[in-house]
Image (tube, helix red, strand yellow):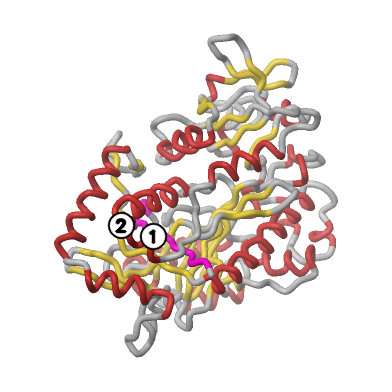
Amino acid sequence: MNFYNEMYDANGGVREHYKGYAAWLAATPPERIERKRAEADLAFHRVGITFAVYGEEAGKERLIPFDIIPRIIPSKEWKSLERGMRQRVKALNMFLWDIYHEQEILKAGKIPAEQVLNNAQYRAVMRGVDVPAGIYAHIAGVDVVRAGAGEFYVLEDNLRVPSGVSYMLEDRKMMMRLFPELFAKHKVAPVQHYPDMLLEKLRAVAPQGIADPTVVVLTPGAYNSAYFEHSFLAQQMGVELVEGRDLFVKNETVYMRTTQGPQRVDVIYRRIDDDFLDPQAFRADSALGVPGILKAYQAGNVTLANAIGTGVADDKSIYPYVPEMIRFYLGEEPILNNVPTWMCRKKDDLAYVLDHLGELVVKEVHGAGGYGMLVGPASTREQIEHFRQLLLAKPDGYIAQPTLALSNCPTFVEEGIAPRHLDLRPFVLSSGKCVNMVPGGLTRVALTKGSLVVNSSQGGGTKDTWVLED
């Protein structure tokens, strides 16, 4: 496979936007780099930037490996990516409004109605609920990859509770602390204002008539794998971090328990899945949620970000239709391409996938975090046969895509500097008035040689992402 290298061109020359960095790297003694890497590890441990891995022994936390060679994106390239992501998130929000209201796209036959209405993430309780400014996905994480010829593709849309933005912010802070001279030489666009931008967006979607809204971050608690991020964002925005037990509902209004007595809550940035949000409406056994919060939400007395029911739009069985949504709602051609996708519920697609399992990536439609997937070229015969049985038993539970030649970037690994595959998750914020994003995002890198799976739960690391300003 031909892999696009972010730093070097096909002839081994350094790409224009990496030249300043490459010269610095060549002139820096290896022992200084090693010392700085150790310093970064120590600092991340001290701050507690860890995540829990499900399925491992209880309470075991890992440090997400951080690589000090940045991923650099030139300004022109970023502008095109930004336009494509704004377009995409705008269309996805219009799709969500539509399927919970008039369902025009389904009536027009652009998406099979049963694909949406029978989806496990479709919440019938949201039918006819007018969410503020028509925004369902206030925070979206769009995973973008670059393939062999250098072209970008959207790999998936994360609209439920996208995580990782704290690593983007901490990686930048760490690079600025370790190598201030690099930032003096490069015009790197800032990302530190993300928490301010997020708070501004959350305040903008408060229920009608609330001039000075109270915003909180709702976490499932300290045992959640992304708890560091929940507490980090609450602290950076200057708002309360709450658990379900800190909130209660009275007269269809949400209140927070405080030492001064109950305080009304207007906007909740929730990091809890729909299923666990309200034991009266969804899972009765949930101890994480707030009884009655759905009624308060339906009454328009509180805003939830992201909205209940957004999950249907980031389901992998809906992903193939996003280009159609862009054409239908915006009358535009998609700026960013989808990865070609076979839908295994279709007879012909399934036949093709079964014949080519060794070449394809097969994903569960509800899967996340790199779990429940087969990377054909990197799998054993037994793993391929296991997936064949899964596909035959439940074809509508899977999609398949070609194995993309994900771009790579020089990365510090045990044997020195070597190319490793990566992706990019920019964070897109919507409030109805506008769609904004900070320049850059979270670059995740597969640290295992040859691996195409970048998820931290699968041993991936992160890099700072630099967007160069003109």
Pointer 2 with pointer 1, Cβ within 8 A: yes
Q: Nearer the viewer, residue 315 or 448?
A: 448
Residue 346 vs 37, above or below: the answer is below
Residue 454 appears anywhere in the view = no
Q: Residues within 10 Å of mark 2 (few under 14, many from 20)?
A: few
**x, y (%) of residue 373?**
43, 61
CA gap, disc 2 and disc 1: 7 Å
Quick one: SS at disc 2? Answer: loop
Instruction: Bin the neighbour count of mark 1 within 10 Å (Cα to Cα): few under 14, some 14-19, many 20 and up.
Output: few
Residue occupied by mark 2: 179
Where 39 falls versus 125 (above or below)? below
| Image quadrant where residue 379 sits | bottom left
Residue in the image at 75% along x and 58% along y: 113
> Which residue position is annotated with label 1?
183
The quadrant the N terminus occupies is bottom left
Q: Would residue 454 appear left or right of 244 to someone viewing this image?
A: left
